[in-house]
Image (spheres, rainbow, N blue to C red):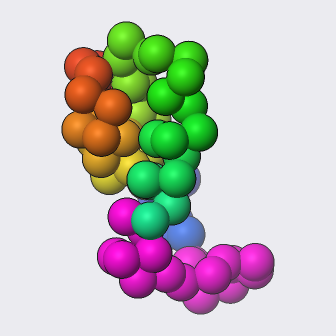
Amino acid sequence: MSHNQYDYTTRKGILPISWNDFHGICKALAAAVSHFQPEAILPVGRGGYYPGTLLAHMLQVEIFP
């Protein structure tokens, strides 16, 4: 198993956003999926726990990390 760290400075196509933008994106996503009436959110690691937690709160559903 390699222990080389990933060099994030070489990533392309990444748009840094503010926490306010992040909240707005999650709010829009929650509104878009609310008609499906989800019962749970299953966030994926490496970046998915923050939006998953916020979506679960916004949709008032359980979260299972």
At x 66% / y 78%, what residue is drawn?
14
Is residue 15 something one can see in this rendering?
yes
Counting labels gives 0
Q: Where does residue 27 sit, x and y in percent of width and height?
A: 43, 53
Residue at horizontal 49%, vertical 28%? 34
- From this viewpoint, which residue is outermost toward the bottom? 9
Q: Is residue 64 magenta?
A: no
Is 7 drawn above or below residue 49 in the view shown? below
Q: Position of residue 40 (x, y in %)?
A: 36, 17
Of residues 3 and 37, the one nearer the viewer is: 37
Q: Nearer the viewer, residue 47 or 18?
A: 18
29, above or below 35, in the image: below
x and y, in percent, of residue 29 in the image: 54, 46
7 to 51, vertically: above or below: below
Q: Is residue 12 magenta?
A: yes
- Start-end of magenta stretch: 7-23
- Taking the image as shown, residue 34 lies to the left or right of residue 43, namely right
Does any portion of residue 49 appear in the rendered image? no
Residue drawn 36% across the image and 77% down it: 20
Q: Is residue 37 left or right of residue 61?
A: right
Residue for point 37% across, 12% down: 39
Residue at the extreme top: 39
The front one of 39 and 37 is 37
- Splitting the image into 4 quarters, where does residue 12 fall? bottom right
Q: Position of residue 5 (x, y in %)?
A: 49, 69
Name, please, the residue furthest toward the right.
Answer: 13
- In the visual, does 27 lie left or right of 58? right
